[in-house]
Amino acid sequence: MPEPSPTLSRRILGAARSALNALAVPALAVFTALVVGAIIMKVVGGDPLLAYLGLWQGAFGSVKALSETCVWASPYIFAGLAVALAFKGGLFNIGAEGQLQVGAVTAAWIGYALPDVLHTSLPAVIHLPLAILGGSLAGAIWGGIPGWLKARTGAHEVINTIMMNYIAVLMAGYLLNGPMRNPDPLNLSARTPSIALSARVPRIFANPDLRVHWGVVLALVIAVAIWWLLYKTTIGFEIRTVGTNPDAAKYAGISVTRAIVLSMALSGLLAGLAGTIEVVGLNYRHELGFSTGYGFDAITVALLGKTNPFGVVLAAFLLGAMRNGATRMQFLTQVPTDIVSVIQALILLFVAADAIVRFIFRLRAPKEKMVLTRGWS
Amino acid sequence: MRKSLFPVFALLVVVSMVLVACGGGAAPAPTTAPAAPAFRVGLVTDVGKIDDKSFNQTAWEGVQQAQKELGVTEIKYIETTDSKDYGKNIAQFGDAGYDVIVTVGFNLTEDTWTAAKKYPKVKFIGVDQFLSKDDKHAEWPLANLVGVVFDEDKAGYLAGALAASVSKSGTIGSVLGTDAVPPVWRYGEGYRAGAKSINPNINVLVTYHNDVGFDKTFTDPEWGKTTGLSMIDKGADVLFGAGGKTGNGALLAAAEKGVYCIGVDTDQYYTVPEAQKAMISSAMKLETPSVFAMIKSAKDGTWKGGLYTGPTGLAPFHDLDSKVPADVKAKLQTIDKGLKDGSVKTNVPPVKPQ
């Protein structure tokens, strides 16, 4: 029996160490944020231990809680992947919120209005994929426009995606209050009619209390697909190369314009999927009050996940668990649910300024710095 | 490696000790039931905060009043952050076996209906939630669900009486959403009737925002403001704005031109601060006493499922209190009393006659 080669065991050990190392800063950032959050709660007169117990119970305490955590995680996975993919391409997509909105609006319209427009009911095998495709394409266009502007004119994507957010959110508000509003005279809310049964993603369990749907599974599949795209395909290589050094990429014969537009369009597509899945998988309609800002939380998710697709999935579940558990936390302690936003902001702070975490916990600085965006040049 | 990890470990220990010390004060869980028979009331807000100076807050004040005066043992609220959570938040109280659950706002109508069927032992108070028997609600009325609704015509009547009393020009105006929505129609016609009851010769300009798509009608502050300004040009010196942002536009027009305005639904002195100096009052749906009355009925056994018509009234005069003569205040109180006991009638039909 041959001895396992020393190089192999060393490699495994090295991989484990680097994985542990990669997890260290995010994990410690979360921990530090929870500690600071506890201190804040204590100062404002809350009971941090009971609050965190509630957060835990609400997120993982029962099958129903677990199901709701998955429900919350699914838009975070899609939107987090969106922001992370743009980061890989050296772009900062702050426009996920807007891309998510146009995705949701489009998917809802296809879901409830298309059968009427075509004067026929559609089978689910056509209707549902159409709704998902339509929603994600709308997101891709919404993200692709700032990408094209950046590639062609150099207009900075941060500014353009923020502006596109306003257009999308206000346009959605107009549509939901006007043309797309459910015309039922008893309906006083700004929401669309329910989408057709044929456009709905089925739930995994028959129990109506368990709202977890196949969209969550789709999110995981897409995460693997994005990892494959980024690390195993030429397109992914081009995106990453342009993200790290566009000049070198250009010398290597990569079309920088194409890579930028593609990154932004793909990013928008993923964000559009986040909105789409919420409509076709969970709410079965679009309405005002639909998003608590998934598109902005997605930035936290992407950074906490270190822009790695699998890291994003972990981060999305963490944030989803916190948002979901907040209800139980408030029920037990009457601590405002806003504390979750505070903790989330602290996580972002500690992840972004990782020197703080490294200083507190005496961690060595990494050899190479992760470059997210190229700034304003 | 060992050397570099030690401080980390030490810090973790210290921090967790601090944490335990922080939480130590509240060791016994506050959820343990007291000896007296528990009566617990939970409230779920619409997307927004408990101190929104609007429906969430006024409904919660009704719950708080019930705790003070009725011996409700425990009250709690959950603030909804995302509309997908309405059902989940209601279930939090339902699963815990609360006696009464208050849900605030018409956006929760369907989720409250579903929850009422799921938790038949829990009594539900749906604030501002109108339901009737139809295809989707064949079981209506449920024994454990009360929808709290309001007579908007009475609130409008009071606003009209106030407007006619303080008007010097003999012309008053009202800017509203579409009259296809019955509550809006009742506000407008109540306003007209109330004004005429004070001064039969008064010129009441009432404009509904009818000629637009179904709900642009409530989100058109530009139109509301323009319409308000043109009414002021025609001599109106009091404006009543009722119809979401469209009505708020009229309030802003009044504030700009220095004439009085009257808000709607809640005390808009707080929700439209830009119009404070011109806001003489608001025609209010009184959530607080309605919620209180329903909790009381749940507690003393007089509860009956279906609809409950809550009281309406005028908001305080705030900054303009000194501009309202004492005899006008007395007159308004008489009218309010008459509307409540039925001796004063608005004669406004519930929906616009076709």
Image (tube, rainbow, N blue to C red):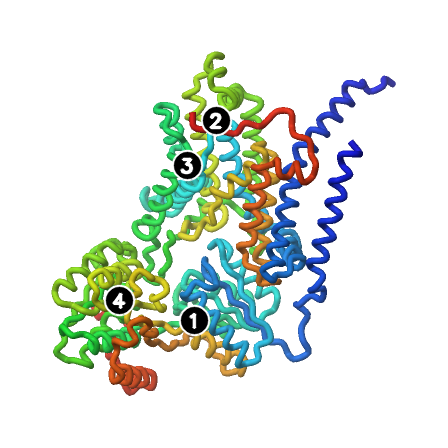
Q: Where is residue A370 in the image (x, y as percent from the top left)?
A: 57, 28
Instruction: Give a yes or no on whether discs 2 and 4 share a subunit.
Output: no
To which residue does mark 4 refer?
B278
To which residue does mark 2 refer?
A374
Q: Position of residue A295 (x, y in %)?
A: 47, 42
Q: Residue B147 — which label?
A: 1
Q: In this view, does B299 lie to the left or right of B320?
A: right
Q: Determine whether B84 is above or below B320 in the image.
A: above
Q: In this view, does B284 lie to the left or right of A76?
A: left
Helix, strand or loop at label 1? It is: strand
Helix, strand or loop at label 2? It is: loop
Mark 3: which amino acid?
Answer: Gly
To which residue does mark 3 refer?
A139
Q: Which chain carries label 4?
A: B
Helix, strand or loop at label 3? It is: helix
Mark 1: which amino acid?
Answer: Gly
